[in-house]
Amino acid sequence: MDEAELTGDAHPEQCVELAVPRLTTNTITIRTLRLAPADLVRLRTEADLVLSDIRTEVMRAEAAWRQLLGEWHADGRRATLESRETDVRLLARVLEALRRDDLVLV
């Protein structure tokens, strides 16, 4: 909101005054802003909308992360199963050799 929009009100007894510090050219100045109840409601509404947008983005990022994590998990499981296939083939050959008594231990 523009500062001019926040200053001045017809009902000063209903307003809230805020002291806002500012740094300008190596000096700190304090400016008092007067907020009417309608301004406070508008600020609250705008803050809620912004927080809602932030929450939505966080949820999207978390969903994308979970999906990627699931893909990594699936890839890892697939790699594990594929590595087991060679073990199973080796064990099958050993069992076949044992059945035939052709196993030669080196």
Image (cartoon, rainbow, N blue to C red):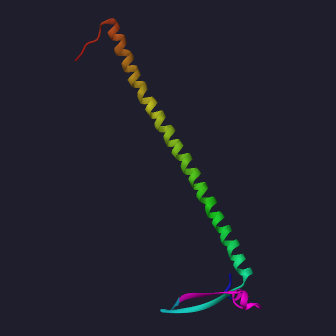
Q: Is 72 or 39 nearer to us in this picture? A: 39
Task: Write the residue at 72% across / 76% down.
Answer: 42
- Residue 9 is left or right of residue 20, and the answer is right
Q: Tell me if residue 101 comes above or below residue 68 in the rendering.
A: above
Quadrant location of the N terminus in the rendered image = bottom right
Q: Give how far across and how far down residue 46 sits, in percent.
A: 69, 72
The answer to whether 95 is drawn above or below residue 79 in the figure is: above
Image quadrant for the C terminus?
A: top left
Q: Quadrant of residue 39?
A: bottom right
User: Which residue extends farthest right?
Assistant: 10
Residue 38 is inside the magenta segment: no
From which residue to which does the magenta span run?
4-22
11 lies left or right of 101: right
Left or right: 11, with 103 as reference point: right
Looking at the picture, tell me which residue is in the foreground, 97 or 40.
40
Q: Residue at x 55, y 48 (%)?
A: 66
Residue furthest out toward the front = 13
Residue 19 among those drawn in magenta:
yes
Figure check: 24 above or below 97: below
Q: Kindly identify the residue that appears in the image at 39 percent across and 16 percent down.
A: 92
- Name the image quarter holding residue 3: bottom right
- Tell me which residue sits at (56%, 46%) in the image: 67
For this rendering, which residue is in front, 34 or 101?
34
Of 89 and 21, the residue lying toward us: 21
Q: Count the marks: how many? A: 0
Residue 19 lies, in percent from the top left, at: 59, 88
Residue 37's x, y, as percent?
Answer: 73, 81
Q: Residue furthest left?
A: 106
Q: Position of residue 44 (x, y in %)?
A: 68, 73
Question: Compared to 63, does 9 lie above or below?
Answer: below
